[in-house]
Image (cartoon, rainbow, N blue to C red):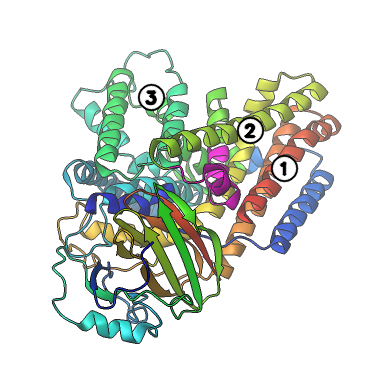
Amino acid sequence: MPSPRFAAPVLALTLLLVACGDDDEAADPATTTAGPAPETSTATDTTAAPDTTAAPDATTTTVATATPTSPAGPDADVVLEAVVEGGSVLEGGGRESVPLGSTVALVVTSDVEEEIHLHGYDVELAVVPGVPAVLEFTADIPGVFEVELHGSGLGLWDLEIS
Amino acid sequence: MAASLLAPVLAHGVGGRSDLPLPLWQVAFGAGVAVVLSFAIAVIVVDRPRLARLAVGRPLPIGLDRALTRVLGPVLRVLGLGLLVVVIVSGLVGAERSPDFPVATNIAPVAFYIVLWQYGQAVSAVFGNVWSVLSPYETLGLLGERFGVVRRPDASPVPPASTWPAFVGIGGFLWLELAWHDNTDIRLLGVVILGYSVWVMANVVRSGRGWLQRGEGFTVLFGLLAAMAPFFRGDDGRLRVRWPLTGLALVRVPTSTSLLILTVLGATSFDGYTRTEHWDGIVGDATGWTATAWATAGLAVFVVLAIALFLGACALSGRLTGDRAVDVLDDHAPSLIPITLGYTVAHYFSNAVFEGQGFWRALSDPAGQGWDLFGSADHRIDYLVVSTRLIAWVQVGAIVVGHVLAVLASHDRALERHAPNVALRSQYPLVAVMVLFTVGGLYLLSG
């Protein structure tokens, strides 16, 4: 796992932002940020930055500076980490309880290119090999939601949000 | 990347959101109520069978009958047949998702797993045998009769067809939904649905439209659920209304259908079980065909367990009355239909509410072409329409009510066969296993 110092490199992260139909939910449940940056607001700013990537399709593109994290990890109420190597989950995963309304950061490191998908909230985040990807969201929908890797179909967590 | 997006969204055949586990106090409450009510039924309802007499019902007003039969019926036929065509075409040649709205997925999975399976069962139990007009196979069969392709009902009789194809059909559907790892692959769904339709229609052409009631799994299953409904068509062709549940007293089933009912019960339990940590612990990181193998084994265990438990109770009951276990099974399996429905509602209520919105969305762009026919293509599923508290009570309520109705129906059936004192004794093993199903069902919801 690379040491946490990518001073500047800007990672192009494709984030599947579902159409903002509801204004209630327009407060953008998932954002990718790095490090101790505060939550949504900053990230939204990042999103606003234009043309930073060349991602195709209809997905909204967002950018995250990967300055992963002092050992304390991102500044969220709940921080969960997982390490995936050789097609299996080495670290983390399983059922996790998350209080409704808290901010959550999912930190995933994979040895191959992957894509994290948080079901229900329908947010996705690309993972570059060896670089911890941080998917942040606000747990505002109750229920049990799977977090899955799309490439391998590997299940990471079941988040029990209540 | 796009190719892999869809599958996990509908993993389990049904959505990536599951219900919160029931708290244990709620499970204990539900189980307690079920047991107490079972005992009360046994003590109070002991003299004679009543349901069959009530099942006669009374006719609906003739005007309403005509409106439903002449207007709503044809509309539903067109919708049913049209939807089948749309689903097959979308599955075979459509895209997995809309180019404009990435959450808007192809109509095939949601139509197959949510609308056909979940809404099909619920609608049948509430409104009666709507499938008899919605079924595209019925409609195609009727058209075939008109054009002389399909044997007419009044033609020379053919020997009754086997009822096992229905069992195999539903078993295959459940395997696809719950065990096959790539269960939302739209191409394969397109091929499966087309292949199934061709096979069904080949049988209809050969044996007549009546084959559907014996060999087509959804027709058989929905027909059983419709027997619980307050609306039905009498022998004279008039639409009639009766107390819910009472129609079950008139249902006679072959062994294949008894096993079909228990298979649905076992499979629904398995679906609940796969959402527990226990199952995660067993399957671990398995993906792909390894996951399919595990799920196939798990599904088989649950189905066999459901069959073995109930057949065991039937054997015990038969020993008390001098009947063969299989005869008791076929006698009492229809009584399990309310429990099966209760399981279905408990496990799929929230899913139907949430993913049903995905169907509404998919109608606007069934084949992922970037259309927006009804202005719903960008609908985002609203997970807050029903609260988690309401979902939990619907789950407990469905299982307990299903249990009580099943005990009532089974008791009534026993009284048709035996003198009250014998009937009561013959019921002990059956009620015991129903209590087991109910407590087990609630327990799975707490995992």
Magenta-tinted stretch: B264-286
Q: Chain of mark 2?
A: B
Q: Quadrant of residue B63?
A: bottom left
Q: Is residue B279 left or right of residue B406?
A: left
Q: Disc 3 or disc 1, which is closer to the eye?
A: 1
- Residue at the disc numbered 3: B211
Q: Is residue B7 left or right of residue B341?
A: left
Q: Residue shown at 32%/68% (left/top)?
A: B380
Disc 1 residue type (three-letter): Leu
Q: Residue shown at 58%/61% (left/top)?
A: B394
Q: Position of residue B387 (x, y in %)?
A: 52, 71
Q: Quadrant of residue B173?
A: top left
Q: Is residue B56 visible?
A: no
- Residue B251 higher or lower than B255, as above or below: below
Q: Disc 2 or disc 3, which is closer to the eye?
A: 2
| Both labels 2 and 1 in a single chain | yes
Q: Position of residue B168 (x, y in %)?
A: 44, 27
Q: Which mark is residue B305?
A: 2
- Residue at the disc numbered 1: B436
In this view, the residue in front, A2 or B344, is A2
Looking at marks 2 and 1 on the same chain, the residue that comes earlier in the sequence is marked by 2
Q: Position of residue A32 (x, y in %)?
A: 33, 74
Quadrant showing the C terminus of chain B? bottom right
Q: Is residue B320 left or right of residue A125?
A: right
